Amino acid sequence: MKILALDTSTEYLSLALWQDGTVLARDLHAGQRHAELMLPLLGEMLAEAGLVLKDMDGVAFGAGPGSFTGLRIGCGVAQGLAFGAGLPVVGVGTLLALAASSGHDKVIACIDARMGEVYHAAYVREGAAWQVIHVPGLYAPQDAPLVDGAGWIGAGSGWLAYPEVLPLRYDGKLRQVMPDVFPHAREIAALAAPLFVRGEGQAAAEAAPLYIRNKVALKMSERST
């Protein structure tokens, strides 16, 4: 099984070529340059691996939530690559990929959503599978869903954006905060692999981002209308 994975949901760009668990990965701080940097970097990786796009069995991408523009770019590139090579596509939730990227088993994943809010989800890993404790949602940090028990890891840029509010919300629940962790294509590929094996990949035209914030382009005063 060979999978090309990409993520553009945050200011970081990450790419991975996953071959039966062996991974060639790249990541860099792209800012707003994802579209400019992605294809040249992908070409370099394929050349290094001695592969071409049609050698892949599928394309996986970070479906969201995250940066509105980044999600559109990631989904569009995944669709274009998959369509051109006749490959299926799998979209993987970025908050789940963030939890997996932390390297821990009890994770409160938060990505800064701007506008005084965070994209939030909570997961517990049991063996090779992840149990969803709280599904992805959009919250003011002081209203983020609570969790049971202690020993949780806080991961993602939301913890950097709200370094006082979120730890106070989860007072007594946290073991560690990892604000610099971001969703990585390496984990997206690993999470997508069993879906491809089960034949759950989509046609390129059916792939879609997960925005959560439907009125993302509106001002705060307009979003309540």
Image (tube, rainbow, N blue to C red):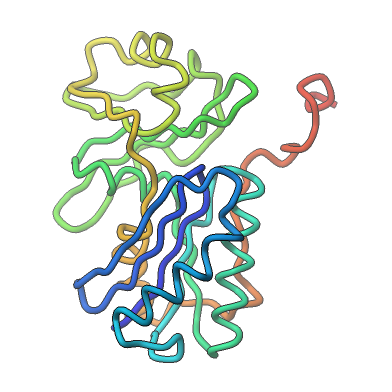
**Residue at the farthest left position:** 127
Question: How many labels, in total?
Answer: 0
Above-or-below relation of 149 to 127: above
Residue at the spot 33% in from the left edge and 14% down from the top edge: 167
* Image quadrant where residue 98 sits: top left
Q: Position of residue 207 (x, y in %)?
A: 60, 69
Residue at the spot 31% in from the left edge and 79% down from the top edge: 48
Tell which of 66 and 8 is nearer to you.
8
* Image quadrant where residue 2 sits: bottom left
Q: Position of residue 54 (x, y in %)?
A: 45, 91
Q: Position of residue 149 (x, y in %)?
A: 20, 22
Q: Position of residue 7 (x, y in %)?
A: 47, 57
In the image, taking residue 136 as reference, residue 215 lies left or right, namely right
Above-or-below relation of 32 to 150: below
* Image quadrant where residue 67 sits: top right
In the image, taking residue 23 as reference, residue 45 lies left or right, namely right
Residue at the spot 35% in from the left edge and 87% down from the top edge: 51
Residue at the spot 23% in from the left edge and 20% down from the top edge: 174
- Image quadrant for the N terminus? bottom left
Tell which of 97 and 149 is nearer to you.
97
In the image, taking residue 219 as reference, residue 69 lies left or right, namely left
- Image quadrant for the C terminus? top right
Tell which of 33 and 6 is nearer to you.
33
